[in-house]
Image (spheres, rainbow, N blue to C red):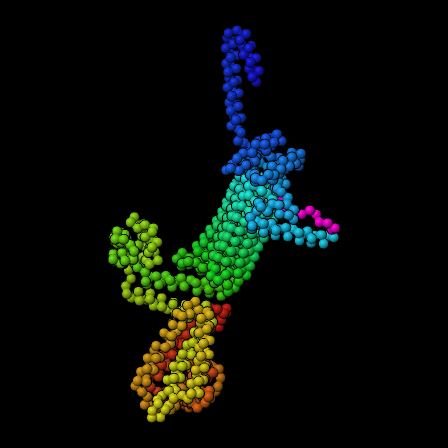
Amino acid sequence: MLKYLGYRLKATAMAPSGRSLTIALLCLLLILLTSFGGGSSAWATDSPVLLTSELLQQRLDHPIQREGKPTLDLRRLVIDLRPENGEFRDRFYRQVRQMLQSGNTAITLDLSNSQIQGELDLRQLSLREPLYGEALFPLLTEAEQAQLKQDRRRLLQLSQLSRSLLLQPQASTQGIFLFRGPLILAQTRFEGPVNGADIFFLGPVNGPGVRFTQGAAFTESRFSQPVTFIASQWQGDTRFRNSLFFNRARFIQASFTGPVTFQGSEFGATAGFAQVQFATDASFSRVRFQGNADFAKTIWQGAGSFVKSSFEGELFLTEARLEAPLSLRQARFSQLVNLRGTTVLRRVDFGDGVFLPGVRINGAAMEFNADQGEILGSPGQIGQVLSVPNLVGNETLLRNWVRNFRQLEQIADANQIEYTTERLRLEVLQKQLTAVNLNTASTARLMTLGFSANQADAILQQRQESPLLSAQDVLNLEEVDLAAYVKVRDRIVALPARPWGARLALALRWLGLSVLLLTSHYGTSVGLVLGVGMVAVTMSTLLFWGMDRYRRRIPTPIAPSPEDVAWMGMSSLGIGGAGVLTVVRLSDWPGLTLLTLVLVVLPVPLLLIAALYRQGRYHDLLDSSYLMEDGSARQLRLLIARLPILPSFAFFRDRYVPIPWDRRRTWLYYYDFSLNNWFKFGFNDLRLRDEQVPGLVTALVWYQWAVGLLYVTLLLWTFSRTIPGLNLLLYF
């Protein structure tokens, strides 16, 4: 071009003046166009250029320094490794491997913003370490050395097994591939498959924005340093089967449009898969997560599998969208499973999962509809681990959970969810009774609670204009900051002013719900109700037996014999002890349950008995029991509609005789009488006689019968909720 311009200038100087001016202008325009063309060519240097043998040799001869480490710069290149370019491909693998794996210093391989055409085999860029020898052990940590020895043993065993099965005289050469330096794949595009299987990566692998268009195989690979594939795209078949990540692995915002498998892999630190999209099936079966497994905000358009996986840290599926079935069957959970805000559109299966004590599934704010999705789990287990932190905002979710388990005929789990709901409701009622009401509290009360004088005045001024609708409304006040609200949020409510009658009704509702929860788990535990009944029958029997058998000491003693005392003591210890053990085993608050039972059974009867002994007994038939038995028949009887007092009809009374006091089995009559009062079921029809009976004794019997009526109602209600179909028999 310069020769051409020189020639034209020389010709111009020999031409006439007018023509010379025209030619000079044309030459000047040509120079400007050439300059702009050169500038555009300079601007285009950022686009990938084809890697040739000469350019490769130049990059190999002049590595760059990055963060004090030598780096082979292969950025912004088009690297053609297709079979038709075999000569360059072989030279590329040979020369790059020689540079990366020779010397004592690990060299970084940087392929950022490059396009790799054809298959990239990372094993050909790695050192091939034989099964024996420890030449490279100084480059490894203790954990890596142990893992390398384990891999060697596994490969040796496989080799021996293959040789024995195929009857080969000698085994083929086995080895392990070691990739020494860091690997940088930022914005790299692989237009062919990538083979990274059986490689021990000693340096970090950093691939933000990398794109695999034809799949990638990292089967049985080991990653010693952090692995980063943020915003990466995996369009083909992705295989990380039996891989081991010693350090953090981050696949955040990645997109897997093809099948992906991490089956049998192990994550030694946090596994970050937040905001990942799985367009097809994804397998994480038999994976061990030693750190937290973060799958927050993931989208599962294909089936996901965590079958037999182990979660030693927390599992986060918060705000995930499950558009396909997700299986966690036989998985092991050591810490919290967080499903807060998760959208469940298909099936989530926790069947046969192992939950360590105290582990819960937090499903707060979950978007779940029993008509669209399903939550499966082992009957009797899944309902106990599902939980929400509070009732407000989760009532619809809890009802849908109940509906889900009832459709699956898992009645125990549905009842457990209802029990959880009522426990949360009790907390709400208790807070309404005990917390400070922002709409009625005085300035002094607010300041005692923890608000400053300025904040208390602002609250009073606000409620004069309009009442606070919720406790969080105080955050709308400029004077109240978040720190002040967090300090008092558990002790404040915002409710309309209530009269004393409404507060009393609220207190009675809280008391009744508390009794139901303590004595029956809100009708969900038959065993607990029966245990409570055993303790109640024992206490009632002892009270009535002592009152009936011990009348006086003088002048003629009317008292039980030592043998009767021994029989009653041993039987009460056995029956009552069995009931207490049942309560301790099944109740969430066994102490409160037993205290509630004592407060119901003992105070009123003890007051009546104390008054009876204080006034004395001076009636006829003093040496005869107050109990009468039906002597016409001995049979099991259901006595719900029977009253505890003997009728006055003379012919009916003729069938009844006093129970004997001189028999060894006398103590059984008193248990039978308590069974009649509490369970409305007994071996004989025992009633209180209607002649020569103090009014205090009659009051005692009627009290026990009335409380027993409430108890048998609770028992039948619990039966109807826990045994499918029994409610039809009871109610119809």
On the picture, is 109 further left or further right than 575?
right
Q: Residue at x 38, y 72 (%)?
A: 595
Q: The N terminus appears in which quarter of the rendering?
A: top right
Residue at the outermost bottom position: 555
Q: Position of residue 709 (x, y in %)?
A: 40, 76
Q: Position of residue 467 (x, y in %)?
A: 29, 55
Q: Position of residue 198 (x, y in %)?
A: 62, 47
Q: Position of residue 685 (x, y in %)?
A: 44, 84
- Residue 241 showing in the rendered view: no
- Which contiguous range is marked in magenta? 168-177
Q: Is residue 56 above or below residue 195?
A: above
- Residue 434 showing in the rendered view: yes
Q: Is residue 426 above or below residue 232?
A: below
Instruction: Please check the rendered image and state whether residue 402 is part of the magenta-colored stretch, yes or no.
Output: no
Front-most of residues 289 and 463: 289
Instruction: Please check the rendered image and state whether residue 170 is part of the magenta-colored stretch, yes or no.
Output: yes
Secondary structure predominantly adopted by residues drawn in magenta: loop
Q: Residue at x 58, y 46 (%)?
A: 138
